[in-house]
Image (tube, grey):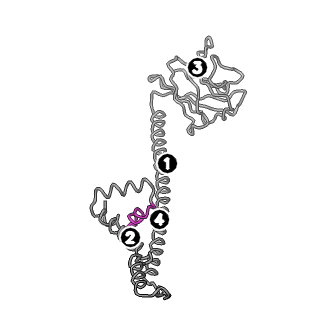
Amino acid sequence: MDIQEYISSGVLELYVYGALTEAESLEVTRALKEHPEIRIEVEEIEIALQKLSAAVAPSYNAEALLASIKQKLSNKSDNTVINIERKKETDWVSYFGWAATILLLIGLFFVFEDRNNLREQLNTEQARNARMEQQIADARDDAEKTEELLAVLRDKDVSKISLQGQNVDPGAYAAVYWNKKENTAYIDAKDLPEPPRGKVYQVWSLKLEPLTPTSIGLLADFTVDENKIFALENANESEAFGITLEPEGGSESPTMDQLYVLGAVAAP
């Protein structure tokens, strides 16, 4: 901690005046215990405020005034009227005291406002930094996914199977990148239409003779996945792949009138 900078920040005056939050007051209290210079500064501020308060208060001495009255009464007859008048004079000390107090309060107000503005700016900067960090993390994650996909596409053990649109949507298209050694099928579903609410795409591995469909998974989170590339496990001896639109959660067997794309695996 820079002691001089901390003292000149105005926080100690706010502490003495009671204008800090509870958390900020606790922070100053800890600083008082750890740094004698700060404790001395606070004591000096308190003394200055006490002097200002004393200067503002009227300077009557009640005991002296009472003694004076008794003395005059003892020297005068009972018929003597005693006029006691307080000498009227301009109490410049009181005026200066009030002026100094007002200036101090104004100064404390502006210091307090400056601290609030700085706190708001700090919160804004922290929020902006958090957003930037999240954007950087997202960009890094996207870059890693891109590198992974490029590695898949360039792998000599990966076979590409094109799935063409069927009667329900002739313009639909998808591709399967199948790595038989790793039993993984990457589904590129970018050219499939968005599924309606309550529906999900389901991917099927097919044996052709006899026709035997086996589900290898759902294209979950389709609407939020920007790349629209999904990795599914496929340990089957697939001869073709198809994708159907099914009720949310999937089906045990494909709904053939909702077959969007279909494609056969090329013979080795």
User: Which is in the foreground here, disc 1 or disc 2?
Assistant: 2
To which residue does mark 2 refer?
50
Q: Left of 258 or right of it: where is 209? A: left
To which residue does mark 4 refer?
112
Magenta highlight range: 8-19
Q: Which residue of the protein is positioned furthest toward the top in this rendering?
A: 210
Label located before the other in sequence (2 or 4)? 2
Q: Horizontal and vertical percent for residue 18? A: 44, 61
To which residue does mark 3 refer?
215
Q: Which residue of the protein is positioned furthest toward the front in this rendering?
A: 78
Q: Residue at x 44, y 54 (%)?
A: 22
Label located before the other in sequence (3 or 4)? 4
Q: Main secondary structure of the magenta part?
A: helix
To which residue does mark 1 refer?
135
Q: Left of 207 or right of it: where is 132? A: left
Q: Left of 172 or right of it: where is 98? A: left
Label located before the other in sequence (1 or 3)? 1
Q: Quadrant of the N terminus?
A: bottom left
User: Which is in the foreground here, disc 1 or disc 4?
Assistant: 4
Q: Say if the magenta span includes residue 179.
A: no
Mark 4: amino acid = Phe
* Any part of residue 139 in sight: yes
Q: Horizontal and vertical percent for residue 86? A: 47, 85
Q: Name the one closer to the observer, 245 or 238.
A: 245
User: Which is in the foreground here, disc 2 or disc 4?
Assistant: 2
Give the alpha-carbon distance from disc 3 to disc 4, as whole Å: 66 Å
Q: Say if the magenta span includes residue 11.
A: yes
